[in-house]
Amino acid sequence: MTRYATYADLKGKVVLLTGGANGIGAATVRAFAAQGALVEFCDRDAKAGAKLQGEVVAARFSKVDLTNEHQINRWVAAAANRHNRIDILVNNAAIDPRIPLKDLSVQKLDLLFGINLRPLLLASREVVPHMKKGSIVNFSSITFHIAPAKMSAYVATKGGVIGATRSLARELGPRGIRVNTVSPGWIMTERQLREFVDAKTKRLIKTSQCVPELLQPGDIAEVALFLASDASRAITGQEILADRGWAHS
C-alpha cells in the first residue's frame, strides 16, 4: 500500500477531479481524501463511482458525461455552491484506444478529443472564477514522448494537454493559479493488467525504465498531491515525467 507524504495545507481544500472512479483517478481520490481534502469527483462509470464514494467518506461522486458541456458546467457549479470555493482541479479523465491511422474516423477523433482534451479546457474555464489562488493538475502521458505506433490520435491529445498547460499557466499565473502536467509512464491499473500487460510486456517495461519496479496508480497520485500542494509553489507551466526514467527515443 502506498503511504502518502503529508501536506498540511491540503487539509480542508476543495478538490475537483475528473475520471475518478477507476485506476489512477481512484487512487488520486483516495490520496486527497487521506490528506483531509474534500473531494468532488466525476466519471461516466456510475457503479465504480458509487462504490468508491461508499469507501471514501470525504469524497462525493457525480456521474458526468465529459463530452457534454452542460453537464461539466452543472457539476462544477454544484460543487462550488456546496463549498463556496474550489481550490484544486485535477484533469485526469482520458481514454487510450489503439487506433491505426487507416481506421481513424471523424467520430473516433471527436470522441478522443472530446474526452482527453476539450473537458480540460472547459472544466478549467468553469473552475477558475471560484478559485482564489489554487492549483490545476493535468494528466498527459509518456506516450507523447515515446510516440508508439497506432496511437497517433491519442498522442495528439496528450501533446495538446502539455500545450494547454503551458499557456494556461501564463494566463492564470497573475491570479495566483498554478498549472502543471503529470505524464505517467506505464501504470499497472486493473485495466492495463487485464487488457495489455502480460509477462512479456512487464519485461519490456522493466528494461525500459531506469528503475525496474513497476509503477502503481498510487505512485502517480503522490505526484498529483505534490503539484497540488504549496510544497510545489515554485512550479508552474511544467510537465513532470513520472515514468521511472523510461528511455525515450
Image (spheres, rainbow, N blue to C red):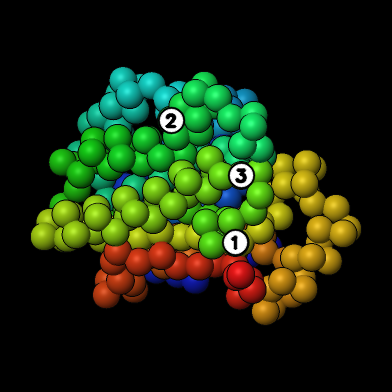
Query: Callout 3: 10 Å neighbours few (<14), some, many (20+)?
Result: some
Q: Which is nearer the eye, 124 or 164?
A: 164
Up/down of 179 relative to 65, above or below:
below
Q: In which quarter of the image is residue 237?
A: bottom left
- Residue 204 relative to residue 65: left or right: right
Task: Name the residue tied to disc 2.
Answer: 114
Question: Label 3 belongs to which residue?
Answer: 151
Q: Which amino acid does label 1 sit on?
A: Ile
Residue at image position (41%, 40%) is 117
Quadrant of the image for the N terminus? Answer: bottom right
Q: Is mark 2 on a helix, strand or loop?
A: helix
Tell me, yes or no, if residue 141 can be seen here. yes
Of the numbered discs 3 and 2, the one sitting upstream in the chain is: 2
CA distance for labels 3 and 1:
11 Å
Residue lying at the far left in this picture: please name it: 174
The residue at 88%/58% (across/down) is 199
* Sequence-earlier tag: 1 or 2: 2
Mark 3: which amino acid?
A: Met
Residue behind mark 1: 146
